[in-house]
Image (cartoon, helix red, strand yellow):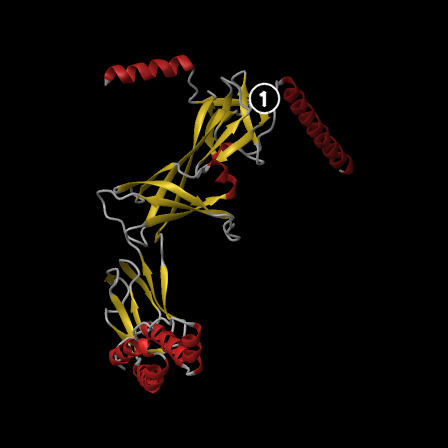
Amino acid sequence: MKNKILLSVVAAIILLGAGYGLNQWFASMQKDPPKRVSKPQKTAVRIQEANPTIIQAEIVTFGRVESEQPVDIVAEVSGKIRESVNLQVGQSVRRGQVLFTLGREPFELGLQSQKSNFMREVAMILPDMKIDYPNRYEMWKSYFASLEVDKPLPKLPSYESEKEKTFLATKGILTSYYNIKAQEATLSKYVVIAPFSGSISEVYLQNGSVAPPNGKVLRLVQNSQLELKVPVETRDIQWIKTGTEVEVSTEDETQQWTGRIARVGDIVNPATQSLDVYVKIQKGKNPIYAGMYLKAKMQGGTIQNAIEVPRRAVFNENEVYTVKNDSVLSLKKVQIKKANKETLIISGIEEGEKVVIEPLINAYNEMIVKVLNSESKAEKAEKAEKTLSAN
């Protein structure tokens, strides 16, 4: 019995071994399927075929219109403000018009008191003049008669001799006269008039306020002489020349004017690293007002042997990729001549070179690429001819 069981186990092991061997033999008879080799994908690039030429440097910037002659009107003397015109922003005034007056009653009464004392002093010298200077008596008598406390002091009669001059000086006539004339000059400062025709742009003190000596009351701008103040980056200031004509317009270019560069500032704005350029605007059919936000387009000098490319075409400050043999990237350094808002004007590119005009990810020198939208010069010329003939 034990021999039968042992024989059965041995037979099973032999059968299993034989089955495994046959399976391996059949498997070795089959050929492996061919492996698929994937072709490397070429990066597609857009290019611009270079045609170096002379490019006019153009600067486009925005700024606000300002009066060429803004003036702060101050109260040279102290007093309560009494407006003669409506002291509000935007109020128009005429040259010579009274803007406001200052309360002057106390000062005016003091001046009248001084004139009254002067009249007394002149009256006191008349008897001496009649005896010592009889030929001058009638003149001084007439001068005394012309004196009024509420009118400006008339001019003092001239003296004919050193003796008369000494006499007037010792009597205090000359001192009193010039003191009163100085006070009359001060009295005139209580009335403030417009130095030119324009508009009020700012009001610092309102009607009824007490103005301190030399305190600012309002700002007056001259609307007939306006200029546009625009910032220009320091790197572009080389293209700016005084007297150059400027195209001035609203942002949407629905209204346009002509101007000329009047002057260029010499102080750099530390926040923007720009200089202020002032454009004198000529009158046109469209009205223009101080405070308007306008665009200025200025033509600068010319740049030789240059091309204009999108800003994204240049990386590492001065490098671009070109495509040689229609499929191989080539790294090239260029010179940036001028930076615009969306484009760069560069030199260092030869005629016919194909410049990549879009940023590339993980690109490298000698990389194989596929060119998109590439047109030869002949094809471009043919397309241009077709367009002209169609029109």
Q: Quadrant of the C terminus?
A: top left
Q: How many marks?
A: 1
For this view, does 68 lie left or right of residue 349?
A: left
- Furthest residue in direction right, as rendered: 3
Write down the quadrant of residue 286 in the picture: top left
For this view, does 51 lie left or right of residue 201?
A: right
Q: Residues within 10 Å of mark 1 (few under 14, many from 20)?
A: few
Viewer-side residue, 248 vs 53: 248
Viewer-side residue, 119 vs 274: 119
Q: Is residue 24 visible?
A: yes
Q: Vertically, is 96 above or below 352?
A: below
Q: Quadrant of the N terminus?
A: top right
Viewer-side residue, 1 vs 300: 300
Write down the quadrant of residue 176 in the picture: bottom left
What's under tag 1, amino acid-wise?
Answer: Lys
Please give the name of the residue rendered at 26% of the width and 60% of the height, measured from the top-left corner: 95
Please give the name of the residue rendered at 58% of the width and 20% of the height, measured from the top-left corner: 33
Q: Position of residue 34 (x, y in %)?
A: 58, 19
Q: Vertically, is 136 above or below 55?
A: below
Please give the name of the residue rendered at 42% of the width and 82% of the height, measured from the top-left corner: 172
Q: Vertically, is 269 above or below 213?
A: above
In this figure, which residue is indicated by the disc labeled 1? 35
Viewer-side residue, 331 vs 160: 160
For this view, does 377 lie left or right of residue 292?
A: right
Q: Position of residue 334 (x, y in %)?
A: 56, 28
Label 1: state its secondary structure: loop
Q: Position of residue 43 (x, y in %)?
A: 51, 27
